[in-house]
Amino acid sequence: MSRRPYPVDVEYADIQGGILTAYGRLGFPFGRFALVCVHDAAGGREFVEKLRNRVTTAVRWPSRKENIAPGRLVIERPPVTWNLAFTFRGLAALGVPTRTLRGMPDEFMDSMAGRCKIIGDATEENPLAGWDRVWDPAGRGRDVHILILLNAQMGEDGRPLPELDQAQADVAKFCAESEGRVELLAGHRGADEHWQQLEALRDSNGLPCAKEHFGFTDAISDPVFEGQYPKLQENERAVGSGASDGAGNWRPLAAGEFLLGWPDEAQEIPGAAMPLDFSRNGTFIAYRKLHQDVAGFKAWIDKTAAGLQQAWKLPHFEAARDTLLAKMAGRWLDGVPLEVAPDWYSWQTFNDECKPKDGHVVRDDSARARALVDFGYRDDRDGLKCPLGAHIRRSNTRDTLDPLGDKPKGSSRMGSALNNRRRILRRGLPYGHADNEDGEHGIVMLVVCASLQRQFEFVQQQWLNYGLDADSGNDGCPLVGNHPKDAKFVIPAHPAAAVPPFIATGLEQWVQTRGGDYFFVPSMTALRMIGMGTVDPT
Amino acid sequence: MPNFDAGHYFYTGLVPVDLRPTRRADNSITSHSHLLREVLAELPNFSAEDKAARPSPFSRCRRTHFARFAIIDDPAFNGRVQQDAIVAAVMRVDLLEHQPVDHLSRSWLVFVADADAADGSDASRDAWARGLWDVMEPELRAIFRHCLGFAKVDSAEAFAAYLAKAQIETTMSFNDYWIDKPELPLMSVPAMAAIALIPAVLAVLAAAYLRWRPWHFDWPWHWPLPWHWDWCGILLVLLALLIGLAVGVWILIRVITAWGARPYPAGPGSDLPGVLKSLFVQQQFTRFAIAQQGASAADLHAAFGRFIAEMRPEQADGPTQSPGVVP
């Protein structure tokens, strides 16, 4: 793979925080998200100006875990991070000029509710009617203009640091001071109707961890792109998470897939809203509040795993349940990929090797971490290890779609070229507890990408809610896809196992959209222009 | 002959739209192209979202796979023909003088369809056209009555003749019913080289013979050069070589294009009834497989026997799905 002559040098202080790295990974397990409606452009800009200097950027803090040296100017890790994002209607309400607005992408203008048919949010099983009042286009959804994202560190008492309450109070105060020109919208389902409350799930020691409500370890595979990490680490971090050439080599993806104003995987800087410095270093997020029906999911798993145990003659129920979950996700509950450990025994063996055994460890932590991401599907074209319809194989197809994937290793392979234009950064945190009496729990997913239509919507529509590219007909993703009546999931069996393929049936709608919208996350430069009202597209 | 490929006739027709004003039923004035677009917009077509939608009238024809209408008003004008600025200056081209702009004489209705056919003959095309008339005459009348020359069409034969007159060659046909690659005749590289080189060899021999008669050879004493070694002879031989090569390559290209122009063989079961039957059996088999999960070998064997007896997979006219809908 040829080296690029001019490495990307991203100006971290110009990019909003939370894009390059998820706050959850940086020690911020709490989130509070609020929505603001701007009734008057000048009042809205005043509000933005009050918050602007508080906004957290991508500048790195000294870190215990991450081996990344801070710059010459050492920035203290803040107790609470602030970030701002805007809907299309929000930018219009703040007085951003028409000529800039018309340079925005169609899907951003349409809003998420406007694209509901494309992304599968308007089906019988997943209707718009299920949205929180604050998101519902028939409720306050049309008034969502500004998204305020607060993330907080955890205090020693296991609760968010008190600065979080103060930050929320400040937002409420600024809205009150505006005398009705800026309104903090109400209508989030949950404990506080003004603030979407989020919190990482806890492990058995009560510490925040990367689990989601169904029990899977989340956020393992996240794209790596140029400029995201220091140059010396870039290639190492790209292994398993960047672009693959089909021969086992990886490189970071082009920065333009995740930041506007940079060349992307098509080797061009795509058009964006003018002026250039308004779009550059900005990006888009799809905010998706996804409810998870944990009880229904677990009941179905228990019922179906019994069938799988019988069909595949598995030794005990736990093996069948774990296998079913792994085949649906493409990873075992602890994140070990099926491509590395295709059956229950090899999974146990893999984990045994990572523990001290006879005084030594076969695989240390870094070898384990690498095995979790550094794999492809070229040797599993029939999905005998990881079904083609499994969640991770659909959403990040790696080298599955290589048209020359059946050719021997060599220059003729194209690796992940088709996949590289469909990558998304996943941010966000879970909300609620699975044992909540009101049954409201799930995840707020923030999908970050330079083109919502090409990246997020494509993955959602073609890969998660449809099965053609996964050789699965109409079958959607068994975990998060839409499941109409008669939904099914086919699990191929290895011929050597002498058992038939297993068809899981009666999949229910375990994940339902509760609301969301498309937001523009401006760079600090663009945020200043918006706040000062000096966006000049001429 | 891309009009016919893989067992399917690909029809493309351009029909001139009537430019004269016309009246609606309520006597208001409008244009034929307006009414034509209205008819086409209201042609029934299956929609998975609209349960009340009726299937396309083309689904009544058990030979037509796909059909499409479009109206072309005019080609797009891309601006002046580009010319190098220096050349234009030297040639004293007046950039203010408008270049001619291409136009169509009128709006044209494009009709494309692909249908099962035994061969690419006109008779096959006409038989399909007559079949269309038999099953959807009212719809065809409603569409084509806005086109020139249709007033005289009053029978299936006349409609077939009308389509024949409007036909232009389909230059890019596409269908994809082969699951595996069919056995195709291959031409070996030595054979292609032979075709390309034989004329050159013959020409060189002939030129050498004409220049240096064999009785002038003082062979073997002056082998390999002939006795009368001369530049004129060498040039003649070289010229013969070039002409021979050109002829050989031309013949090779003709042979290859002739091979390439042969229609691709029809895929097994790729006629419309066969395709519908395949879709039907595929769906039913999925349901069968789900229903039989965990069954004993004996039960599965018996159930599969019943399934085959009921489905009759080999008989396209047995149980099957309706055309024009997604069940």
Image (cartoon, coloured by chain):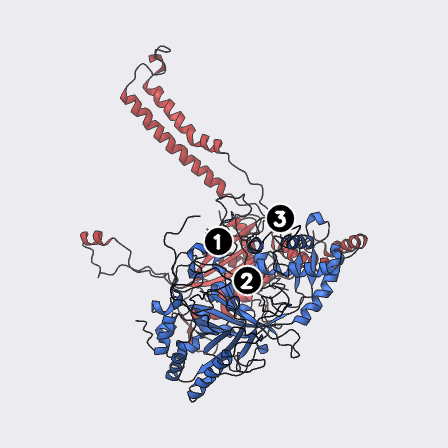
The blue one among the chains is A
| Quadrant of the snapshot with the C terminus of chain A | bottom left
Quarter holding residue A156? bottom right
Q: Residues within 10 Å of mark 3 (few under 14, many from 20)?
A: some
Q: Position of residue A458 (x, y in %)?
A: 51, 63
Residue A11 visible? The answer is yes
Q: Is residue A311 left or right of residue A389?
A: right
Tags 2 and 3 touching, CB below 8 Å: no
The residue labelled by disc 1 is A236
Residue positioned most to the front: A359
Q: What's the amino acid at mark 2?
A: Gln
Same chain under badges 3 and 1? The reply is no
> What chain letter is assigned to the residue under label 1?
A
Q: Residues within 10 Å of mark 1 (few under 14, many from 20)?
A: some
Residue A423 place in picture, x, y as percent: 50, 60
Q: Which chain does the numbered disc 2 sit on?
A: A
Distance, label 2 to label 3, CA atoms, is 30 Å
Q: Is residue B292 visible?
A: no
Horizontal side of A120 relative to A95 (left or right) equals right
Q: Position of residue A378 (x, y in %)?
A: 57, 49
> Looking at the image, which residue sits at the far right?
B298
Q: Earlier in the sequence, mark 2 or mark 1?
A: 1
**In this orientation, which residue lies closer to the viewer: A255 or A174?**
A174
Please tell me whether mark 3 or mark 1 is closer to you in this view: 1
Which residue is identified by label 2?
A: A462
Mark 2 or mark 3, which is nearer to you? 2
* Location of mark 3 (residue): B268
Colour displayed for chain B in the image of the structure? red
Query: Where is residue B198 drawn, in percent x and y?
Result: 43, 28
Secondary structure found at label 2? helix
The amino acid type, in three-letter code, at marker 1 is Glu
- Cα–Cα span, label 2 and label 1: 31 Å
